[in-house]
Image (cartoon, grey):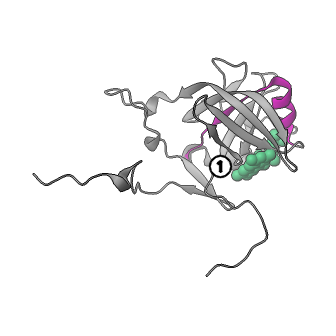
């Protein structure tokens, strides 16, 4: 039996990503976003929805670039802090000991401590109401070398201790229960 709730966005879990923006040592900033995700594989496209009152909104709008940095257990506290404090008042990189590094393709910053940083170029801004949706093309991905298996060259995001955000709370990821397509895989015959 289900109870009726008023309409709201209740899609969980979602990421709690750190969005970095601006230019190194100039107007760089970082904030936390959960309204962030993939919208197309080819070409690779992402979105982030940002309230116009955020300090980062103006920075991203003026440069047309930002970076989606995935977050893990090591930077969980910084992830929350960057989501409750504004770059108008703090240098959040300094306060949270996050290291800003110059990106490779766009002229912005990524976070050294993040396991994976996705460089994005804004293609469209759609005002939706409380949030503006920034639709962006992925132009480069920077992956932490510690999670690349030296023997095979495979990138292991499963080693990165990623975190998720579920209805106001942060969580570690649990045990793996399957992989893509496992529900239709044929069982191997016993030898
Ligand atoms: C878990 C979490 C998720 C958030 N998701 C969003 C989001 O998707 N969009 C947004 O505009 N603000 C979001 N916020 C709020 C901003 O991160 C917060 O207002 C931040 O202080 C803005 O920083 P800035 O003023 O330096 O840009 C989120 C905050 C938290 C803690």
Q: Tell whether 106 sits left or right of 130.
A: left
Residue furthest toward the bottom?
A: 1
Residue 94 appears anywhere in the view: no
Q: Name the foreground residue: 121 vs 15.
A: 121
Q: Is residue 143 left or right of residue 92?
A: left
Magenta-drawn segment? 54-72
Where does the image place residue 21, in percent across and percent down from the top left?
A: 75, 30
Some atom of ligand 1 lies within 8 Å of the CB belonging to the residue at label 1: no
How many numbered badges does the structure rendering display? Answer: 1
Disc 1 residue crowd, few under 14, some 14–19, many 20+, Cα 10 Å: few
Residue at x 74%, y 35% (from the top left corner): 135
- Relative to the observer, which residue lies in front, 182 or 88? 182
Residue at (40, 57) in percent of width and height = 177
Q: Which residue is mark 1?
A: 77
* Quarter holding residue 147: top left
Q: Is residue 161 visible?
A: yes
| Residue depicted at x 58% and y 30% | 42
Q: Position of residue 30 (x, y in %)?
A: 74, 36
Residue furthest right in the image: 53
Task: Decide which of 83, 39 is in the foreground and name it.
Answer: 39
Position of 42 with respect to 94 (left or right) is left
Vertical relation: 8 (above or below) 52: below
Query: Magenta span has 83?
Result: no
Q: Nearer the viewer, residue 82 or 156?
A: 156
Relative to 47, 172 lies left or right = left
- Residue that appears at 47% across and 40% down: 157
The location of residue 22, given as percent across then percent down, is: 78, 26
Quarter where residue 169 is shown: bottom right
State the quadrant of the N terminus: bottom right
Secondary element under disc 1, as helix, strand or loop, is: helix
């Amino acid at each position: 039996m289900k109870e009726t709730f008023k309409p709201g966005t209740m899609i969980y879990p979602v990421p709690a990503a750190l969005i970095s923006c601006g230019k190194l040592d100039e107007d760089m900033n970082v904030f936390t976003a959960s309204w962030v995700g993939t919208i197309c594989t080819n070409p690779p496209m992402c979105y982030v929805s940002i309230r116009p009152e955020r300090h980062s909104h103006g920075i991203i709008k003026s440069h047309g670039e930002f970076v989606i940095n995935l977050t893990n257990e090591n930077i969980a506290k910084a992830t929350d802090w960057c989501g409750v404090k504004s770059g108008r008042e703090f240098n959040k990189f300094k306060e949270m000991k996050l290291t800003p590094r110059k990106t490779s393709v766009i002229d912005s910053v990524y976070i050294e401590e993040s396991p994976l940083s996705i460089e994005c170029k804004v293609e469209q801004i759609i005002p939706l109401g409380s949030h503006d949706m920034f639709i962006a093309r992925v132009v480069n991905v920077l992956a932490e070398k510690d999670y690349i298996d030296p023997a095979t060259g495979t990138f292991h995001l499963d080693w990165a201790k990623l975190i998720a955000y579920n209805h106001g709370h942060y969580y570690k990821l649990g045990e793996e229960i399957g992989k893509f397509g496992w529900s239709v895989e044929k069982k191997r015959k016993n030898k």
